[in-house]
Amino acid sequence: MSRPYVTGRDLIEAGIGPSERFSEYLDYAHRLRLAGVDKDSALKQTLALARKTERGDKEKKGT
């Protein structure tokens, strides 16, 4: 059943694995939904945030 909002399953299916920041990504997606952003756009924006954040985290760790 497809939901009209971004779920954890959506993030996992898009390649974002559970991490310590996972709940931050879901919170961000929820705030987008409250702002009236449709699911597809919210998912794209959330994935962009997650990838950017994870890249930054890797750079900080030097990996």
Image: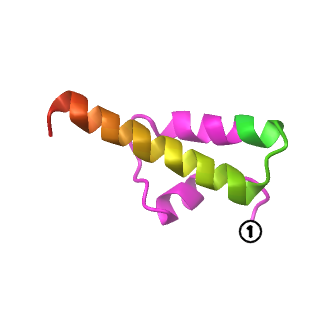
Q: How many marks?
A: 1
Residue topped by disc 1: 2
* Image coordinates for residue 2, horizontal then vertical, percent: 74, 68
Left or right: residue 45 versus residue 38 is left
Residue 3 falls left or right of residue 62: right
Residue 60 place in picture, x, y as percent: 23, 28
Extent of the magenta region: 1-30
Q: Amino acid at mark 1?
A: Ser
Question: Looking at the rendering, which quadrant does residue 39 occupy?
Answer: bottom right
State the scheme by which the image is colored: rainbow
Instruction: Tell me, yes or no, whether the highlighted magenta stretch contains residue 45.
Output: no
Depth check: give the residue in front, 21 or 32: 32
The residue located at (68%, 50%) in the rendering is 42
Relative vertical location of residue 60 with respect to residue 45 in this rendering, above or below: above
Residue positioned 60% across, 54% down in the render:
44
Q: Tell me if residue 12 comes above or below residue 34 in the rendering.
A: below
Residue at image location 43% in from the left, 54% down from the top: 16
